[in-house]
Image (tube, grey):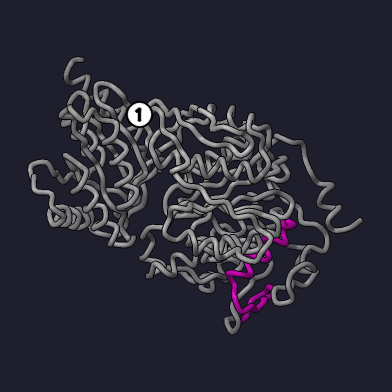
């Protein structure tokens, strides 16, 4: 029996998630590695898992020492062995003395962990159609929309995003706040999706994850590019490096695959050039293709040309907001590239659920309270612009914004947020987001100074309340009937990170709790 047929014979029942997923690698799996990463068959046969995190090592683990931003895995080799590692992969020249397990030297341990993980799990990406979604804004939303459309069409699809991981319709918890987990976890998740019957997987591809080789040795059927604006420059340093990292996704598209590109973005030609001369279909989309007929927080009625129709279709979706409609259009074009028929698309568009933490209306009357992940200048401007459009232009309704900016992240974000607030907010409440090891009050003061510098002159309408719960409560007190209260920056996230650790958190839950407290006090 061939290596590939052995793998095919392991397939399980479609639609069934494998609880406590365990994987037994196929005999001879290490023989499919590139020579540089080759593992002796005796060692390979004893490996039960792969990890680059010494805290996750258990008996039978192959530990791969990777140098990270804050820690160097080579410093934890002895810890890994004490916890049961049967072998270690190390950088050339970093051999430890007196180690009782085999050591394999390689020139690049990041590529090694990706290569070995993919081989260990029998290259699951080759058996399915992976669609990667990259860009500064809209990655998670586009991924979730695309997954919903595929599932509505009767396909079994997996999903890996910032917000959620799903196998079919079953949600899986992400134990970290990494959008894109390390290569062993990515390959393990893909393997579980394959064994659970998935034929398609939508994967949110971040610039940092791509740069750190977490998606190396993944093969993609298609890629979607949403947009590019400044972000993560604390890591990439320059916009050029940031763009190049995003572009790595397009080098992983298989022959005869497709690339869906936002034709209105300034970088559209760059991303298109990455697949020139290859047997890859390039599909551009633009917001100009959408005819908005009616939009509210309840949803949107719009017109759109589907490729199989002679005339544009009039469609209804639960989504609202211009950028969500752009994300929907990107997902539609990807579905068409995958061969979905128009009837499936039309019924799927109607059934898309609202996206957690993205223009998420958690309270409607007497005040509209919206929770949104917007945490950069561009995303905040877009969100505030959409909310402003929801107002009657003749009214005196106001937008109150509760927002902060994360510590240990690009400080330029704080100035960008300030510019957006100065331009579009009526009342500003500055608070904690994830201060981490930075001084929370200093972050808030920096934003406050930048808001004034950007032209916001009404200091009475800018408050500084570091405690996020108290800030939300104050926002609810200040907002009048008909106003909009925007809680920005965290969206779907379930914790706030401080220097001492993290606390459990949900903006949406806190809004409802504090609203009930306010009603109790007022006697309503």
Question: Residue at 34% across / 36% down in the picture?
Answer: 371
Question: Residue at 65% across / 58% down in the picture?
Answer: 280
How far across and how far down the image is residue 379, in percent? 34, 48
Instruction: Tell which of 186 and 273 is nearer to you.
Output: 273
The C terminus: image quadrant = top left
Q: Which region is colored magenta?
A: 96-123
Counting other residues with Cα less than 10 Å from the Cα at mark 1, is it few (<14), some (14-19), or many (20 or more)? some
The N terminus: image quadrant = bottom right
How far across and how far down the image is residue 504, in percent? 38, 41
Question: Residue at 16% across / 52% down in the picture?
Answer: 451
- Specify whether residue 85 is painted magenta: no
- Specify whether residue 121 is painted magenta: yes
Figure disc tally? 1
Secondary structure category for the residue under label 1: strand
State the residue lying farthest toward the top.
524
Instruction: Tell which of 154 and 24 is nearer to you.
Output: 154
Instruction: Tell which of 311 and 411 is nearer to you.
Output: 311
Mark yes or no: residue 153 visible. Answer: yes
Q: Is residue 194 above or below residue 523?
A: below
How far across and how far down the image is residue 51, in percent? 61, 61
Mark yes or no: residue 59 visible. Answer: no
Q: Circle 1 sits on which residue?
A: 362
Question: Residue at 27% across / 37% down in the picture?
Answer: 486
Q: Is residue 213 above or below residue 440?
A: below
Residue 127 lies left or right of residue 479; in this view the side is right
State the residue lying farthest toward the bottom.
93
How far across and how far down the image is residue 178, in percent? 48, 53
State the residue lying farthest toward the right.
1
Residue 91, picture quadrant? bottom right
């Amino acid at each position: 029996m061939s290596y590939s047929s052995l793998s095919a014979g392991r397939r399980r029942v479609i639609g069934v998630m494998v609880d406590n997923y365990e994987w037994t690698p196929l005999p001879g799996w290490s023989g499919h590695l590139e020579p540089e990463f080759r593992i002796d068959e005796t060692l390979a046969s004893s490996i039960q898992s792969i990890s680059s995190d010494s805290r996750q090592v258990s008996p039978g683990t192959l530990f791969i020492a990777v140098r990270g931003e804050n820690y160097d895995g080579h410093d934890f080799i002895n810890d890994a062995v004490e916890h049961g590692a049967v072998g270690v992969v190390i950088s050339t020249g970093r051999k430890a003395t007196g180690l009782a397990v085999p050591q394999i030297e390689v020139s690049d341990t990041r590529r090694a962990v990706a290569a070995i993980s993919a081989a260990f799990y029998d290259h699951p990406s080759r058996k399915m159609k992976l669609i990667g979604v990259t860009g500064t804004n809209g990655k998670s939303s586009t991924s979730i929309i695309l997954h919903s459309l595929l599932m509505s069409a009767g396909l079994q699809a997996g999903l890996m995003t910032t917000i959620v991981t799903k196998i079919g319709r079953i949600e899986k918890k992400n134990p970290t706040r990494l959008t894109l987990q390390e290569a062993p976890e990515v390959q393990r998740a893909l393997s579980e999706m394959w064994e659970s019957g998935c034929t398609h997987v939508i994967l949110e591809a971040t610039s940092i994850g791509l740069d750190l080789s977490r998606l190396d040795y993944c093969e993609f059927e298609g890629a979607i590019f949403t947009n590019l604006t400044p972000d993560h420059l604390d890591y990439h340093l320059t916009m050029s490096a940031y763009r190049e990292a995003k572009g790595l996704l397009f080098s992983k598209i298989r022959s005869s695959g497709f690339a869906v590109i936002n034709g209105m973005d300034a970088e559209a030609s760059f991303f298109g050039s990455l697949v020139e001369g290859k047997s890859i279909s390039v599909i551009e989309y633009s917001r100009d293709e959408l005819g908005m007929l009616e939009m509210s927080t309840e949803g949107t009625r719009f017109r759109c040309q589907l490729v199989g129709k002679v005339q544009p279709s009039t469609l209804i979706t639960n989504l609202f907001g211009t950028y969500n409609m752009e994300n929907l259009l990107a997902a539609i074009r990807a579905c068409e590239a995958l061969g979905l028929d128009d009837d499936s698309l039309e019924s799927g568009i109607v059934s898309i659920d609202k996206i957690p933490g993205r223009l998420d209306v958690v309270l409607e009357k007497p005040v509209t309270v919206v929770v949104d992940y917007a945490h950069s200048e561009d995303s905040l401007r877009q969100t505030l612009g959409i909310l402003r459009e929801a107002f009657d232009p003749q009214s005196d309704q106001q937008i109150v914004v509760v927002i902060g900016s994360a510590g240990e992240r690009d400080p330029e974000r704080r100035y960008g947020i300030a510019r957006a607030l100065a331009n579009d907010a009526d009342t500003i409440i500055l608070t904690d987001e994830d201060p981490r090891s930075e001084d929370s009050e200093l972050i808030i003061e920096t934003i406050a100074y930048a808001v004034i510098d950007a032209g916001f002159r009404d200091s009475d309408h800018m408050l500084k309340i570091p405690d996020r719960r108290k800030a939300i409560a104050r926002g609810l007190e200040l907002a009048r009937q008909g106003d909009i209260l925007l809680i920005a920056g965290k969206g779907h996230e379930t914790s706030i990170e401080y220097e001492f650790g993290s606390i459990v958190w949900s903006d949406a839950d806190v809004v409802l709790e504090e609203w009930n407290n306010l009603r109790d006090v007022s006697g309503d």
